[in-house]
Image (cartoon, grey):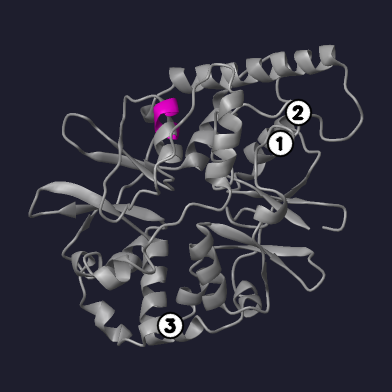
Amino acid sequence: MASVLGPSSSHDDNAAPSSSPSNSVPVPSSLLREREVVRSAGRDAIGTFLDEHTCYSVLRASGKVVVFDTRIPIQLAFYALVEHDMQAAPLWDPASCQFVGLLTVTDFIDVLRYYRRTRSDVSALAKRSIADILSDPDILSTVLVRHLPAGVRAKADRLAPTRPDGERIELHPPANHHRTFLSADANATLKHACRLLHGHSLDFLPVLLPDDMRVLSVITYTTVLEHLVTHFREQRRLFDDTAHDLGIGTYGPDVVTVRSSQTLAEVLHALHASGLSAVPVVDDEDKVVGVYSRSDITFLAAATDAEDAVANLDASLESLMAQRRTDVTTPDALHTCKRGSTLQSIFEYFAQWKFNRLIVTDERG
């Protein structure tokens, strides 16, 4: 059995954790109060850290940013993302002289899904511009519609009243990053960046120089977490609670899984419909055997042309997973923990492997 712990499932970064124990053994009220004090101190310590560090502090000493003119063919843009090993790039509209959105690897995969479903001539992608694709009402209203993961809003509403300061983060409908350019000033705090990522259900957040609107980087939750784990110092033992007891992650019926026998098209549809970036892959005994990400481009790398790429959508997930990199240094490789894993141990594990998500497994795996 599996549960998921990762940026996409922890949509309330400042939510107060539940004070109820994870088992049925009564806990003295004094111990519960002490536990809440420690948890509150942990929240405050991380909140202070995020307030004291800016977006500029998470930027690498050297790096590159790819920006696309909306007039170039979308297929060419995708190959540029792959060549530069990037997941997303800002879109520049020369007519209005401003940034108008983001293009991601996942967007191109979703466009291929649209061409497969409508049986359209996929060779046309070689000529269709980014602007043309992103102004197509049929594409925008189907495969490029963004969904909020099941249970996220209910979880936020349930936990918000327990916040000791009474503060809550408003959840907006998932932002359409194709036509809305949300960004953060390089001098903005990391807490502000996290609020933008969380409040608008963003996967990527461009960081800009305020004076000349130059894009310095595109950051993610993982970028912020890597900075936190590297630079946060705290002598007190504030993170000995389990991630489960802290309400971090997705558990029970809200967890979506797929089987390795399913086709890639079926898996990608399930991910899109559920608003998820990745999903645990299980065998016939519900044992976790892998994890599949929407941004996995294995089926594209194995294709000779666009038609071949669309044909690969009918391949089984098992066959495609056998072709991709499997070493643990891959961010989307399978990493697991147990329900009893403490937040401290997860921080330490992340510091070593820099994964995007953890799959929480039971004794059966």
Span of residues in magenta? 190-194
Q: Nearer the viewer, mark 2 or mark 3?
A: 2
Asked if the residue under mark 1 is in contact with the one under mark 2, i.e. CB atoms within 8 Å, the reply is yes
Give the mark, 1 or 3, whose residue is nearer the N terminus.
1
Residue visible at 55% across and 37% down in the picture = 156
Residue visible at 76% across and 26% down in the picture = 240
On the rendered image, what quadrant is the N terminus found in?
bottom right
Res 243 label = 1
What is the spatial separation of the Cα atoms under label 2 and label 1, in whole angstroms?
7 Å
Q: Position of residue 234 (x, y in %)?
A: 65, 16
Residue visible at 59% across and 56% down in the picture = 330
Please state which amino acid type lies under the numbered disc 1. Answer: Ala
Left of 314 or right of it: where is 58? left
Q: Secondary structure at mark 2?
A: loop
Decide: is 221 above or below 126. above
Q: Please, what is the dominant secondary structure of the magenta stretch?
A: helix
Which residue is denoted by mark 3 in the rendering? 310
User: Is residue 268 part of the magenta span, yes or no?
Assistant: no
- Residue 69 picture quarter: bottom left
Decide: is 119 above or below 14. below
Please state which amino acid type lies under the numbered disc 3. Answer: Val
Disc 3 crowd rating (10 Å Cα; few below 14, some 14-19, many 20+) is many
Disc 2 crowd rating (10 Å Cα; few below 14, some 14-19, many 20+) is some
Left of 119 or right of it: where is 232? right
Relative depth, front residue between 45 and 208:
45
